[in-house]
Image (tube, grey):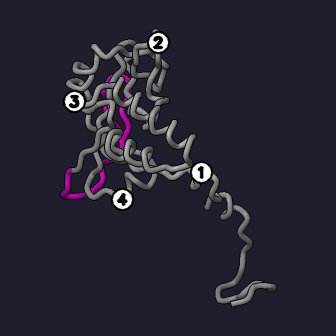
Amino acid sequence: MQGHFRDLRPGDAQALVLAAPECGEYFTSPPSTDAFALVKDEVFLACVANGCAIPTTEKAAMNRAGRWVAAGQTIDRNGGIHGEEPKTKIASYWLTGPAAAYQSWASLWRKHRAAETIYQKTGSEEALKSVMTGDFGTAYKPRQIGDARDAKALATRAEPLAKRVVPVGVFF
């Protein structure tokens, strides 16, 4: 789970991470068609670490071997989990659409492509929002936010001021 979305969930926010059968690296798929590779009209899951094209036939085995990793933790190639779990009495779990048993990778790819086409034609983000929240299982980030100012970038421009001092030229 990425960004603030993971931070807003109560509990230890455990995410299901999958190991790529070819390279053994653990990963969580990004919530977009970037998670997939299209080869000869067949949809494969793309390993984020090394770009391995994983066939659908591997999905069930990958899910069975998946590991739950809490917020603030990492997992190495050997399956070793490192870092501290959040101190909470609530266990919470999250998995992305590619790990969902009821959802095929081809279906996710097609739904996202269709929603993207609707957005390109109409400018409406409703179909994308529906696919991201309902099928990919993650929060939808509106396209306009991508153009918003970055708070960290603005913070680097801050000038030191004494407390309760209003800078020259500022009205309140």
Q: Local crowd at mark 3 within 10 Å, few (<14), some, or many (≥20)?
A: few
The answer to whether residue 69 of the structure is visible from this angle is no
Q: Amino acid at mark 2?
A: Val
Labels 4 and 1: the sequence-earlier one: 4
Labels 2 and 4: the sequence-earlier one: 4
Q: Which residue is mark 1?
A: 146
Is 79 magenta? The answer is yes
The answer to whether residue 2 of the structure is visible from this angle is yes
Q: Which residue is mark 4?
A: 8
Of the two numbered discs 2 and 1 in the rendering, the one whose residue sits closer to the viewer:
2
In whole angstroms, how far apart are the C-alphas of marks 4 and 3? 25 Å
Q: Which residue is mark 2?
A: 39
Q: Amino acid at mark 4?
A: Leu
**Residue at the limit of the structure toward the right, as seen here:** 169
Of the two numbered discs 2 and 4 in the rendering, the one whose residue sits closer to the viewer:
2
Q: Which residue is mark 3?
A: 101
Left or right, residue 23 beside residue 154: left
Is 73 magenta? The answer is yes
In whole angstroms, how far apart are the C-alphas of marks 2 and 3? 22 Å
In whole angstroms, how far apart are the C-alphas of marks 2 and 4? 37 Å
Q: Quadrant of the C terminus?
A: bottom right
SS at mark 1 in the image? helix
The quarter of the picture where residue 162 lies is bottom right
Point out residue 118 in the picture as x, y percentages from the top left corner. Answer: 50, 40
Q: Is residue 87 above or below residue 62?
A: below
Point out residue 61 in the picture as x, y percentages from the top left corner. Answer: 23, 19
Q: Is residue 164 above or below residue 120?
A: below
In whole angstroms, how far apart are the C-alphas of marks 3 and 1? 31 Å
Q: Local crowd at mark 4 within 10 Å, few (<14), some, or many (≥20)?
A: few
